[in-house]
Image: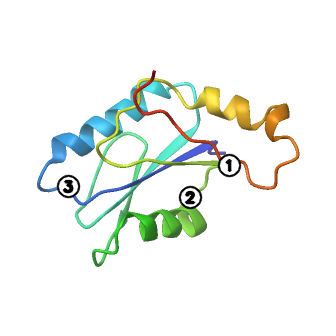
Amino acid sequence: MVNVSFLLPTNRQQSHPEILQTAINSINVMHEGLSYEILVYAQAPVKGDHVVWIKEDSLIGPLTAFNIMGSSIAKGEYLVCCVDDHSFVNSVEGCLDVVEGPLYRDKDYKVIGLNPSGA
């Protein structure tokens, strides 16, 4: 069972692969204890630990990519929407604790924002 699906659309896999790789590496480093997948929506193949590449046939933009990945491809119980120029400095486990806690108990949709700076 996959607990978390990281949804990561990109259009930089060929022009700036180091930016995309930094995002992927930060997810892998910060989430070793979780069961997760990294769904990368891109035109060219992307490989890496926990990476599932989804081919983008035409430039549709990140919002449509999030919808496609989140509605029909992701296997995780939780979805984390991120972009290729973000680096994780903390695990999302703290967010999962919050959305499963008393504050969100009676909510139909459990949505929480991430602070990419870690502050």
Query: Which image quarter: residue 87?
Result: top left
Q: Secondary structure at mark 2?
A: loop
Q: Which residue is mark 3?
A: 12
Q: Earlier in the sequence, mark 1 or mark 3?
A: 3
Query: Which image quarter: residue 95?
Result: top right
Looking at the picture, how far across and down is residue 106, in whole percent? 88, 46
Q: Quadrant of the N terminus?
A: top right
Count neighbours of disc 3 (C-alpha within 10 A) and say few if under 14, some if 14 to 19, many if 20 or more.
some
Say what amino acid the circle numbered 3 marks: Arg
Q: CA distance from mark 2 to mark 1?
A: 9 Å
Nearer to us: label 2 or label 3: 3
Q: Which residue is mark 1?
A: 77
Q: Earlier in the sequence, mark 2 or mark 3?
A: 3
| Residue beneath the point at 30% across and 77% down | 57
User: Does the residue at mark 1 contact the one at mark 3 (Cβ under 8 Å)?
Assistant: no
Q: CA distance from mark 2 to mark 3?
A: 22 Å
Q: Which residue is mark 2?
A: 74
| Residue beneath the point at 59% across and 43% down | 4
Q: Quadrant of the C terminus?
A: top left
17 vs 65, left or right, is left
Looking at the picture, how far across and down is residue 25, in whole percent? 33, 33
Q: Is residue 28 above or below residue 9?
A: above
Residue 39's disc is none
Looking at the picture, how far across and down is residue 8, in whole percent? 40, 52
User: Does the residue at mark 2 contact the one at mark 3 (Cβ under 8 Å)?
Assistant: no
Count neighbours of disc 2 (C-alpha within 10 A) and say few if under 14, some if 14 to 19, many if 20 or more.
many
Q: Secondary structure at mark 3?
A: loop
